[in-house]
Amino acid sequence: MIDVALTVGTYLDNAGFGTVGTDIFIGQIPATQDGIYVLRAGGQMNNYVPIEESVVDIYVKNTTSQQAIQTLEQIKRYIHRMHSTTIGNDYIYTFLVLGDIEDVQRDLELAKIYKITLQVVHRDEAVIS
């Protein structure tokens, strides 16, 4: 099974938004570091074909709210122009941004955290149906 959060993180890495493991994190972000983190929030698999619809949250944490919002707006614009692509063994059919940028909270260092939610339609190319 493909980790779709890692796939989205790699997609953002390839687009120049950061580097996975340095300022793009999968699952959680270090407490004292600003950056982007990607988390699989849910989804479902089609009954008879190996196509999945996953929900992925992209969070941006930054001590400057304006910078965090700007980063998410840039990600939204980039994803909006997205076409089908292969990342590793994961074939991405579409990304769809659900809703708008949400103000999540402040962390213990008073950095602001914002997020967008994506629907990702994808399949593992290693699975034969």
Image (cartoon, rainbow, N blue to C red):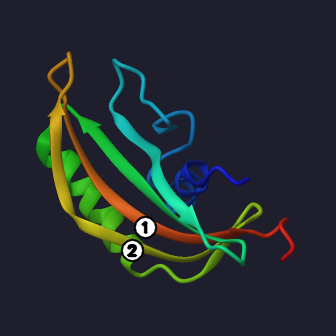
- What amino acid type is highlighted by mark number 1? Gln
Residue 20, above or below 118: above
Tag 2: residue type?
Leu
The location of residue 20, given as percent across then percent down, is 56, 42
x and y, in percent, of residue 73 in the image: 24, 63
Quadrant where the C terminus is found in the figure: bottom right
Quadrant of res 127: bottom right
Residue positioned 17% across, 52% down in the render: 102
Q: Residue at x 72, y 78 (%)?
A: 49
Q: Position of residue 28 (x, y in %)?
A: 45, 31
Q: Is residue 26 above or below residue 51?
A: above
Please tell me which residue is depicted at 12% across the width and 48% down the height of the picture: 66
Whether the residues at callouts 1 and 2 have beta carbons within 8 Å, the answer is yes
Residue indicated by mark 1: 119
Residue 23 in the figure: left or right of residue 117: right
Label 2's element?
A: strand
128 left or right of 81? right
Q: Nearer the viewer, residue 64 or 86?
A: 86
Label 1, label 2: how many angstroms apart (C-alpha)? 5 Å
Q: Which residue is mark 2?
A: 96
The picture places residue 70, in percent across and down from the top left corner, at 21, 56
